[in-house]
Image (cartoon, rainbow, N blue to C red):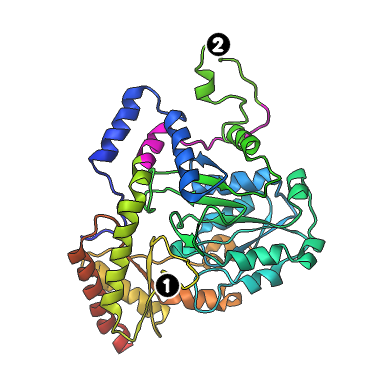
Amino acid sequence: MIPFSPPRIDEAIIEEVSNALRSGWITTGPRTKQFELEISEYVHARKTLCVASATAGLELMMRWMGIAEGDEVIIPAYTYCATANVVVHCGATPVMVDTKPGEFNIDSEAIRNAITPKTKAIVPVDIAGWPCDYNAIREIVEDPEIVKQFKAESSIQKKLGRIAIIADSAHGFGAQYQNQPLGSVADITVFSFHAVKNLTTAEGGAICMNLPNGFDVDEIYKELNTLSLHGQSKDALAKSKKGGWRYDVLTPGYKCNMTDIQAAIGLIELRRYKSETLPRRKAICQRYNAAFAGKDWAILPTFTDQSGSESSYHLYQLRIKGATEPVRDAMIQCMADVDIAVNVHFLPLPMLTAYKDLGYDISDYPNTYKQYQNEISLPVYFDLTDDQVDQVAHAIISAYEKTAVNA
């Protein structure tokens, strides 16, 4: 069987995790702190906090910003449920907008039309690792007419003075937006290090801060670190120092810190990311492109453009021209019949029961549905061989000939 996206676990990972275990320090400690520093350097962030998941990171930032009941947060209808769930958890309302026609990412003009005085944040999602149009989004939030209607409710919102840009870049680690790494272009960028991501720590995520210069990111880091540890004034590393046992709880916080065992995996992954991981994923995507280049039914993903943007090559989102949802599903079954795992990214939020029950309707997001109904995500991972890539491509072509041609 060809799996969809297994993590790369080799001797280098096993040895570093073993070293962490032997060190006697397995919760948040020196490896986590080092991982944060190296992430900041890699993505050009002003400061980074590692957390238990990207989901936890998104919610932590929304709560830090004071987003609460009565507020609105603009998100794409085309994303994983976590993007919306964290808004609901904060008591705010997810305002879903459509994708740009022919694309998977959020439509910036649809964002503009969705803004109200209740809007506190926009959460662009870099689907498959392809960057959203951050310049267009920044132009919107800095438009004097938009700024004029912004109603700040918290001290942080007042200091920012406009709608916040909190990027859900769960897929985007290593991507470039106009020659700038994701992590340096939004106010806040949250990455995922889940097991299926390009860079994994088994579970985990990172909050990368690029807030305006008026914000003291060192102080914010301390505050977020406290919030991620139940509001405790000292983390375990600080408490372990001689005489350092005494602590206080400054606020009823949360529990979403990263451990040194996770960071041990991440440090190895990060140090070989640019030299090994990204080149291999890029080569796999290019090999798929070559296999489908002569097929007029194959709509190929975008990985680069002339502005200097480049994907993280997290997913290969193939679209089948003219295919309906049942035809796409039949192709996926054909792949399963030959033991090749593929996926769909994603079931749009308005098609999920939890959000249908809240009144969202996929018919209000026609571009989102058009992208979804004929999309198939193909395997992309470091250990996937060229022969296996060819096997996947040939199986997709065969599946198309068995299903879509006769539909």
Give the quadrant of residue 289. Answer: bottom left
Q: Residue at x 54, y 77 (%)?
A: 367
- Residue 382 lies, in percent from the top left, at 28, 55
- Residue 77 lies, in percent from the top left, at 56, 67
User: Range of the magenta residues?
Assistant: 250-267
Which residue is labeled 1 in the image?
302
Q: Is residue 89 visible?
A: yes
- Residue 16 lies, in percent from the top left, at 31, 34
Q: Residue at x 45, y 54 (%)?
A: 173
Quick one: label 1, few (<14), some, or many (20+) residues within 10 Å?
Answer: some
Quadrant housing the N terminus: bottom left
- Three-letter code, disc 2: Gly
Q: Secondary structure at mark 2?
A: loop
Q: Residue at x 50, y 48 (%)?
A: 54
Which residue is labeled 2 in the image?
243
Q: Is residue 261 magenta?
A: yes
Looking at the picture, tell me which residue is in the foreground, 349 or 232. Answer: 232
Q: CA separation, marks 2 and 1? A: 56 Å
Quick one: label 2, few (<14), some, or many (20+) residues within 10 Å?
Answer: few
Looking at the picture, tell me which residue is in the foreground, 253 or 34. Answer: 34
Circle number at residue 133: none
Q: Is residue 9 left or right of residue 174?
A: left
Q: Is residue 67 magenta?
A: no
Q: Secondary structure at mark 1?
A: loop
- Three-letter code, disc 1: Thr
Q: Is residue 181 left or right of residue 3?
A: right
- Furthest toward the left, the residue is 387
Quadrant housing the C terminus: bottom left
